[in-house]
Image (tube, grey):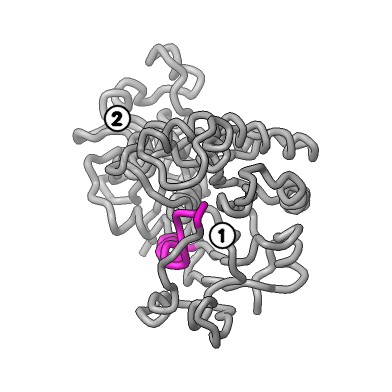
């Protein structure tokens, strides 16, 4: 059965340059963007959180500063991105405001989703924006990123964002309807409606070329699918060459769905439980242990002692007073900060540390409990 867009609670929507910008005149396609935003607003009204990964800064900027057509040097791309980001952010701000929504701009590089501390900072910022009802509009930070620290396409950036934020759906709006058994330009292929596993045969269907304005192609979308499905989220490739593209999906079921075998939370918990080496341990009292089993986060007030040398975001083992392993989690503090707030109440943390730190030592989303015998 084709998934229903209204069933998802956190959706990342990736919009490419070739959809946002008219390749003939380099101008923003305002009517199309307004239609997409109306679709997004309907999903928000239905209870979904929306994140946008939007290309278009370079395409808009090269027109703004008169760089014209043709291949650009790295520094020209960066200059175009600097000018185009203002135009792009302003466009999203305008269309979202028309539906009572607030936009926030986030610029990321590869390191922001690879290096642990920067990953956590980005995730916590975006999580806060979503909690406040704001729509994050995310793009690669082309102004400062060099070839060594770039994604190079926003398909994979969108996949990393979806994984980082435990989204349950990523929608890649594309130049084509979805994945075909044979690249559409060769003819004779059939649209693949559902993929439950990315096999070599699926990868062979992808081809490689992107459009003039887009640096991605179907191959990058398949790479994105691997990331997203592993994180427990659905992914949809569908055409953005229609007005109201999200409503079109709801009405027609058009596109290619990639189906995960687990939920985002289950996939993340599995990663925490098995893929990370603990860097220390935290001993908690019986009251804190009961709170964790009831689905609560670990607060400093329930901690009795800490061992190990760990940094913020590292995995640590959680122990009972008797020394039994209760679970594992990702700590919001380094070992020094955690030591300083042992036994402290949440309203005492700022006084102790000199800054307003996290309320939780380990957030429940970053916590996996051991199954009791």
Q: Where does residue 228 sit, x and y in percent of width and height?
A: 46, 61
Where is residue 71 shown, x and y percent of the image? 41, 47
Quadrant for the C terminus in the image: bottom left
Sequence-wise, which precedes: disc 1 or disc 2? 1
Q: What's the mark number on residue 172?
A: 1
The residue at the point 53 percent across, 79 percent down is: 180
Q: Residues within 10 Å of mark 2 (few under 14, many from 20)?
A: some
Is residue 294 positioned above or below 231 on the image? above
User: Which stretch did the figure color magenta?
Assistant: 212-232
Tell me what residue is drawn at x 75 percent, y 59 percent: 243
Q: Is residue 316 above or below residue 247?
A: above
Front residue of this view, candidates 98 and 121: 98
Dot 2: what SS? loop
Residue 12 can be seen in this image: no
Report the front residue among 85 and 253: 85
Residue 301 versus residue 42: which sits nearer the camera? 42
* The N terminus sits in image quarter: bottom right
Residue 244 visible in the shown view: yes
Q: Which residue is mark 2?
A: 334
Q: Secondary structure at mark 1?
A: strand
Q: Residue at x 24, y 46 (%)?
A: 278
When asked about the image quadrant of residue 230, the answer is bottom left
Place of residue 24 in the rendered image (x, y in percent of width and height, measured from the top left)? 63, 51
Write the residue at 60% across / 53% down.
13
Q: How many numbered dots are placed on residues in this image? A: 2
As rendered, which of 227 and 221 lies closer to the eye? 221
Q: Are marks 1 and 2 in contact (CB under 8 Å)?
A: no
């Amino acid at each position: 059965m084709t998934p229903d867009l209204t069933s998802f609670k956190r959706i990342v929507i990736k919009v490419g340059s070739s959809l946002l910008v008219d390749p003939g005149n380099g101008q923003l396609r305002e009517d199309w963007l307004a239609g997409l935003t109306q679709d997004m607003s309907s999903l928000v009204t239905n209870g979904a959180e929306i994140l946008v990964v939007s290309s278009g800064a370079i395409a808009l900027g090269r027109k703004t500063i008169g760089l014209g057509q043709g291949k650009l040097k790295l520094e020209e791309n960066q200059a175009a991105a600097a000018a185009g980001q203002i135009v792009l952010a302003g466009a999203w701000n305008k269309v979202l405001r028309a539906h009572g929504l607030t936009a926030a701009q986030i610029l990321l590089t590869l390191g922001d989703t690879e290096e642990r501390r920067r990953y956590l900072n980005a995730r916590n910022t975006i999580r806060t924006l979503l909690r406040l009802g704001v729509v994050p509009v995310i793009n690669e930070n082309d102004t400062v990123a060099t070839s060594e620290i770039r994604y190079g396409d926003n398909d994979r950036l969108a996949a990393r964002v979806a994984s980082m934020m435990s989204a349950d759906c990523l929608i890649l709006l594309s130049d084509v309807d979805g994945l075909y058994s044979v690249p559409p330009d060769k003819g004779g292929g059939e649209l693949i409606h559902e993929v439950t596993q990315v096999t070599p045969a699926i990868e062979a269907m992808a081809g490689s070329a992107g459009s003039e304005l887009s640096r991605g192609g179907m191959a990058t979308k398949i790479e994105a699918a691997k990331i997203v499905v592993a994180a427990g989220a659905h992914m949809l490739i569908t055409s953005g060459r229609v007005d109201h593209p999200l409503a079109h999906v709801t009405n027609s079921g058009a596109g290619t769905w990639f189906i995960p075998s687990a939920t985002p939370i289950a996939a993340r918990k599995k990663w925490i439980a098995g893929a990370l080496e603990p860097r220390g341990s935290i001993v908690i009292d019986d009251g804190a242990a009961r709170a964790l089993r009831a689905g609560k986060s670990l607060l400093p007030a329930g901690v009795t002692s800490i061992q190990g040398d760990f940094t913020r975001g590292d995995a640590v083992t959680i122990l009972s007073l008797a020394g039994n392993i209760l679970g594992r989690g990702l700590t919001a503090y380094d070992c020094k900060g955690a030591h300083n707030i042992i036994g402290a109440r949440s309203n005492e943390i700022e006084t102790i540390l000199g800054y307003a730190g996290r309320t939780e030592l380990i957030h429940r989303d970053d916590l996996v409990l051991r199954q009791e015998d």
